[in-house]
């Protein structure tokens, strides 16, 4: 009995890589995994603020259910375009989940709009973390023949270039693991 180890549940990688800490004001944009969004929102705790922006009512319902299941507190807003309903410099961190629909959109006007909004909403020294699909891993990688190093850095260049053009002077690739790629941009003071 004493040799048996209890297995602690580990925090998902995306939650850890978001870098959200207790007490922070965090905004999440987009919906790719409602559970992941709820767990990131829970990291800000009771002393922080968590807000989530999605594109439609169905996505909002999925996120609200995941937030309730995680026991987190967060505001969910449905935004179709235009200015986001928050004051300037309202957030310490922004986590973007659907980069191809927002900050890395092929449409230059859409991309510029979301980058302006992110820059406006972040406080000086705040950070933006983009979570996007990365290198395939596990069985999918083996079956498709795409292994590590098949273009992760090259693929992330679009997001990195967009962030630099959007007013984020410090941009870096944090990592590419478990099928996700993490890019961070810091707003100047």
Image (cartoon, rainbow, N blue to C red):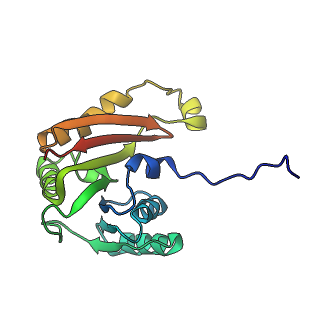
Q: Position of residue 158 (x, y in %)?
A: 24, 36
Seen as rendered, the residue at the extreme right is 1
- Decide which of 48, 36 is in the foreground and name it: 48
Q: Position of residue 181 (x, y in %)?
A: 39, 40
Residue at position x 26%, y 49% from top? Answer: 128
Left-right relation of 3 to 123: right
Residue 118 visible in rendering: no
Seen as rendered, the residue at the extreme top is 149
Q: Position of residue 131 (x, y in %)?
A: 36, 47
- Decide which of 185, 3 is in the foreground and name it: 3
Residue at position x 23%, y 61% from top? Answer: 91
Residue at position x 17%, y 46% from top? Answer: 187
Count of numbered circles in the view: 0
- Decide which of 11, 166 is in the foreground and name it: 11
In the rendered view, tell whether residue 141 sits above or below residue 9.
above
Residue 133 visible in rendering: yes
Left-right relation of 111 to 71: left
In which quadrant of the rendered view does residue 185 lie?
A: top left
Left-right relation of 182 to 72: left
Q: Position of residue 38 (x, y in %)?
A: 44, 65
In the rendered view, tell whether residue 85 sits above or below residue 37.
below
Residue at position x 38%, y 50% from top? Answer: 18
């Amino acid at each position: 009995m004493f040799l048996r180890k209890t297995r602690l549940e580990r925090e998902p990688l995306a939650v850890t890589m978001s870098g959200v800490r207790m007490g922070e004001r965090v905004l999440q944009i987009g919906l790719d995994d409602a559970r992941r969004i709820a767990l990131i929102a829970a990291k800000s705790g009771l002393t922080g603020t968590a807000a989530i922006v999605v594109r439609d009512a169905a996505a909002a319902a999925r996120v609200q259910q995941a937030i309730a299941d995680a026991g987190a507190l967060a505001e969910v807003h449905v935004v179709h375009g235009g200015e986001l309903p928050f004051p300037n410099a309202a957030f310490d961190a922004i986590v973007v989940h659907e980069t191809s629909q927002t900050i890395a959109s092929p449409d230059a006007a859409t991309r510029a709009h979301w980058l302006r909004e992110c820059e406006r909403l972040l406080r000086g020294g705040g950070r933006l973390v983009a979570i996007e699909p990365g290198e395939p891993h596990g069985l999918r990688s083996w079956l498709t023949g795409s292994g590590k190093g098949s273009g992760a850095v090259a693929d992330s260049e679009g997001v990195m270039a967009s962030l630099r053009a959007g007013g984020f002077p410090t941009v870096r690739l944090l990592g590419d693991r478990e099928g996700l790629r993490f890019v961070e941009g810091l707003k100047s003071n």
